[in-house]
Image (cartoon, grey):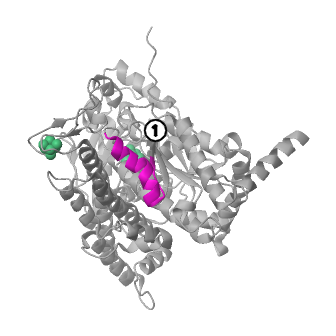
Amino acid sequence: MSEEIIKTVDRATKELIDKAERENIKTVFSRSEEIRPCPIGIEESCCKICAMGPCRLPRSKKDSQRERVGVCGATIDTIVARNFARRVAAGVAAHSDHAREVAETFLKTARGEAQGFTIKDEVKLLAVALDFGIEIEGKDARDIAIELAEKALREFGRQKGELTYINKAPKKRQDIWRRHGVVPRGIDREVVEVMHRTHMGVDQDYRHILLQTTRCALADGWGGSMISTDLQDIMFGTPVPVLGSINLGVLKEDEVNIVVHGHEPLLPELLVAASREPGIRSLAEKVGAKGINLAGMCCSANEVLMRHGIPCAGNFLQQELAIITGAVELMTVDVQCEMQGLQSVAECFHTKLITTSDRARIEGAEHIEFHPEDGLDTARKILRLAIENYPNRRHAVYIPSYKQDTVVGFSHETINYLLGGLFRASYRPLNDNIINGRIRGVAGVVGCNNVRTPHDLCHLTMIKELIKNDVLVLTTGCAAMACGKAGLLIPEAAKEFAGSGLQEVCEAVGIPPVLHMGACVDNSRILVAATAMVKEGGLGDDLADLPAAGAAPEWMSEKALAIGHYFVASGIFTVFGTTWPTLGSDRVTGHLFKDYEEMFKGMWAYEPDPIKAAQLMIEHIDKKRKALGIDKARERVLFDMAMRRALG
Ligand code: SF4
Ligand code: MSK
């Protein structure tokens, strides 16, 4: 008898995969069985950059000495590096185009031209304006916001100099970047230059290609992503911890269910506001619904969950399954991570799939375009469409009963206040607890789901292993949602899952052992938090000195590669699971996995086993503790606990 393949560790997901199979509805799970990954493509040993190819250059089992070069003479190292560079650039482009949309909307908001948007966080407005060198004395918030928006927009098209936020990094880090010539000039410029250099017959030294890849990735982490996080916070409010609910069980049988899916929080913010208007709610009652139930999916979910407590229906691999409940009247999608398969699933039900961005359409889906000038009217129109669709349910509704309470919204500012107190916000207590060994180190575990590995399993296995070993975990994206569903984002999780030192700290402060920091673009919050730890003192003078590591155990998106690469370039040891896209070239892999530690003091690693990957991270954290001379403190803490147990 063949062994059953585990597709997910989430019970709600399992029930709906089974339902899809019974009803013969194709999903990402069934399609992944029909299409196996290409063994040459998986290690990127293939070039299709010019029409003399594609040149396929797998390793030859028969002739290991055979030279692996394409028709033009490009070596396998050049080909693999070019492919990696282009994937990173695509990820940077995605985050940064999101940021551009946010910055343009921010400018319209400041000018009073964006319907339904205001400046919500004036404290952050002033802080970010100062980062941009804007004189704030004697100016009103509106003028400061206009100047900030214009300066932020100039970061995209800047041709020379350095991105403004580079100055936020520790001085030593900036020096490393300057020494290697990787400080980004302008966000768009770095993406364009990757595309140019990787065109046929341009840059043909893999190390040189990877340097530009690094500059491009930094333009995301310390550019596009950071800009979008900051401007979103100013417009919609900087997240503070809120209680929410997560998993497909948040859908409601007797209400109009609307799922907001994608990444840009602009329209979702207005859908939240409009869904609370009495006029819209009474329309829902007129069609026999008890109310309007807005729920999020993927990173849009993270955004509205952490700012408004709007329930989250699930992460990346659950998007089609939400529709398969038969309870979703309407799903909006904007950009990134929206499967085209959504439309064919929606056609099996009454669900309307609505594309809302001028940059993304799906054949068969209805298109209602969001523009800031009349955004609130658009939100109302979409809600009315959903309400009108409620009586059209034509299948028995099946909503799995699983949902979980979750505490989210740990921005850098919140961590600061929570640890140090409102009047003396500080990272000192966190640093002290790392120095005294209660907290062994900090790990950023982020990224997607990937159908090639059981849904949520690697996230949860890795994170449980880390917190068990007293590593505080910061999380974003779909990893954060996996944690939420598994009950790791509530303070009580510390008692159940964390090691004794971490547990003690979590209980004293009242935080979970895993802190939800937001959506994919909010990985910039992790950089800012790490920088704050360095600046607080006692843990070295560079990000690379921190007992910290990063991981994306279930990554699938090019954005994840961009994030991973800016973490590495920022000095953080970063482990990816599922697959690794440079395995076709030993030299490229060696360069990223070893030489980068020499050059940037951060490096990549690949380990699909989540326990082994967590152990690599812990080893790295311990290595950093030793280098800081704080390894003995931890031994004392552990000795104390053993003594206590013996006494008990
Ligand atoms: Fe082949 Fe060279 Fe063309 Fe790539 S650029 S497809 S290696 S000939
Ligand atoms: S949504 S990029 S699957 S984390 Fe940001 Fe999730 Fe990855 Fe998309």
Density class for disc 1 (Cα within 10 Å; few <14, some 14-19, many ≥20) is many
- In this view, the residue in front, 480 or 624, is 624
| Quadrant location, the C terminus | top right
Viewer can see residue 522: no
Q: Position of 632 compared to 7: left or right?
A: right
**Residue that carries the numbered disc 1 in the rendered image:** 252
Residue found 20% across the figure and 57% down from its top: 197
Magenta-colored stretch includes residue 598: yes
Residue found 45% across the figure and 33% down from its top: 455
- Residue 160 x/y as whole percent: 27, 75
- In this view, the residue in front, 306 or 172, is 172
- Residue 536 x/y as whole percent: 61, 70
SS assignment at label 1: loop
Q: Position of 66 compared to 415: left or right?
A: left
Q: Is residue 68 above or below residue 266?
A: above
- In this view, the residue in front, 570 or 330, is 570
**What is the residue that sits farthest to the left in this orientation?**
51
Viewer can see residue 18: yes
Which of the 4 image quarters holds residue 217? bottom left
Q: Is residue 276 above or below residue 541?
A: above
Tag 1: residue type?
Answer: Lys
- Residue 159 x/y as whole percent: 24, 73
Q: Position of 430 compared to 413: left or right?
A: right
Bounds of the magenta segment = 585-604
- Residue 144 x/y as whole percent: 38, 82
Magenta-drawn stretch, dominant element (helix, strand or loop): helix
